[in-house]
């Protein structure tokens, strides 16, 4: 019996699930980067915009991006030069700078997400019930995967 047949009769092994999640994540990231590039953004700049649902401290962005705080400064400088973000002092500690998306930044990341053609096409292959099931399953996984982020 092949590994695929075994996975079908007994359910997929964790390794198979991990490989599938990695493949989907890689394809989604590539699609995101391609859409971002059409707006003159690197994938990392677009990722910063995607994280800015509210004010985020510079150090918090470094943690989210898993990079050194000095790298975030350059990324934010370039986004700020394009008026996609602005820095604001923290109300609690004026030494801390928060990064906030501008209206132009929010619009840009909305368009990037909207233009992710490969990802949208893949999701269009699911019917409404399948989409709801996938959403529920991903929501169950999300807290565990994000707790150390």
Image (cartoon, rainbow, N blue to C red):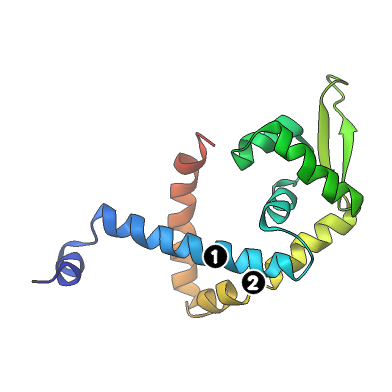
Marked residue nearer the N-terminal end (1 or 2): 1
Residue corresponding to mark 2: 116
Q: Report x, y in % for residue 48.
A: 72, 48
Contact, CB < 8 Å: mark 1 with mark 2? yes
Q: Report x, y in % for residue 67.
A: 62, 37
Q: Which mark is residue 95?
A: none
Say whether residue 35 is left or right of residue 135.
right
Q: Nearer the viewer, residue 30 or 106?
A: 30
Residue shown at 83%/20% (left/top)?
A: 92
Q: Which mark is residue 28?
A: 1
Q: Report x, y in % for residue 136.
A: 46, 57
Q: Nearer the viewer, residue 140 or 83?
A: 83
Vertical placement of residue 132 versus 45, above or below: below
Residue shown at 69%/69% (left/top)?
A: 35
Vertical placement of residue 84 versus 40, above or below: above
Q: Report x, y in % for residue 111.
A: 76, 68
Vertical placement of residue 92 versus 51, above or below: above
* Alpha carbon distance from label 1 to label 2: 8 Å
Vertical placement of residue 132 versus 95, above or below: below
């Amino acid at each position: 019996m092949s590994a695929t047949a075994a996975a079908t009769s007994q359910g997929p092994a964790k390794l198979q699930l991990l490989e599938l999640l990695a493949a989907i994540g890689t394809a989604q990231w590539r699609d995101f980067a391609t859409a971002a590039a059409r707006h003159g953004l690197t994938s990392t700049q677009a990722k910063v915009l995607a994280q800015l649902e509210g004010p985020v401290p510079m150090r918090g962005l470094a943690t989210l991006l898993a990079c050194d705080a000095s790298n975030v400064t350059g990324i934010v400088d370039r986004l700020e030069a394009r008026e996609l973000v602005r820095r604001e002092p923290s109300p609690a500690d004026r030494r801390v700078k928060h990064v906030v998306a501008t209206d132009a930044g929010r619009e840009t990341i909305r368009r990037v997400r909207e233009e992710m053609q490969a990802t949208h096409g893949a999701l269009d292959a699911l019917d409404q019930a399948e989409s709801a099931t996938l959403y529920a399953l991903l929501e169950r996984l999300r807290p565990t995967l994000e707790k150390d982020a």
